[in-house]
Image: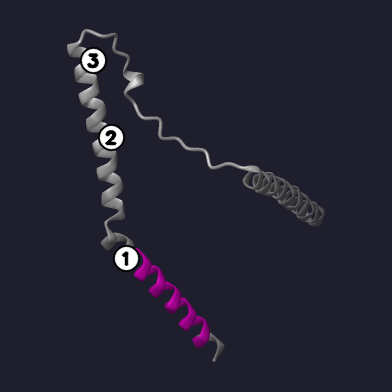
Amino acid sequence: MKKYKLLDIIIVIIFLIFVCSYYISNSGYYEYELNKKTVLTNEKIKEFEEDVKNNMDVDIKEYLLDEEVSYANKITNAIYELSDSGNKLVKKGLKSIFKKLSNFIEEDD
């Protein structure tokens, strides 16, 4: 009986994921973001061409968009540190477990 309940929950979750992805694809959000990037790029191309026509000093770095956005804050940094310390702890624990297992194997030989 519990297997069927778990299967029902999995099917509902998959269905909800499908509905969300279907809505996102039909809402045009992705196409809008691509169009926005294209418009910005076309504006930079026009700006570059105008600067070349006016014999201005042209540096390609001025026309490239810096899209790297940092979403880090105190909470995310704390979570990263907690995750790193947890990873180190698990790594030490696994090393000690495997070291003890190797000692048991070596003793049997």
Query: Which marked residue is nearer to the observer: mark 1 or mark 2?
Result: 2
Q: Secondary structure at mark 1?
A: helix
| Distance in Å between CA atoms under marks 2 and 3 | 17 Å
Q: CA distance from mark 1 to mark 2?
A: 26 Å
Image vertical order of residue 17 relative to residue 48, above or below? below
Q: Which mark is residue 23?
A: 1
- Of mark 1 and mark 3, the one earlier in the sequence is 1
For label 2, the SS is helix
Q: Secondary structure at mark 3?
A: helix
Q: Residue at x 46, y 83 (%)?
A: 8
Reply above or below: 2 against 102: below
Residue at x 29%, y 39% (from the top left corner) = 37
Residue extent of the magenta highlight: 4-22
Residue type for callout 2? Leu
Q: Residues within 10 Å of mark 1 (few under 14, many from 20)?
A: few
Residue at 43%, 78% in the rendered image: 12
Q: Percent position (x, y) of residue 103?
A: 80, 51
Whether residue 10 appears in magenta in the rendering, the answer is yes
Which quadrant of the figure contains the C terminus? Answer: bottom right
| Tag 3: amino acid | Asp
Mark 1 or 2, nearer chain start: 1
**Is residue 79 toward the left or the right of residue 101 in the image?**
left
Mark 3 = which residue? 51
Q: Which mark is residue 105?
A: none
Q: Is residue 13 left or right of residue 95?
A: left
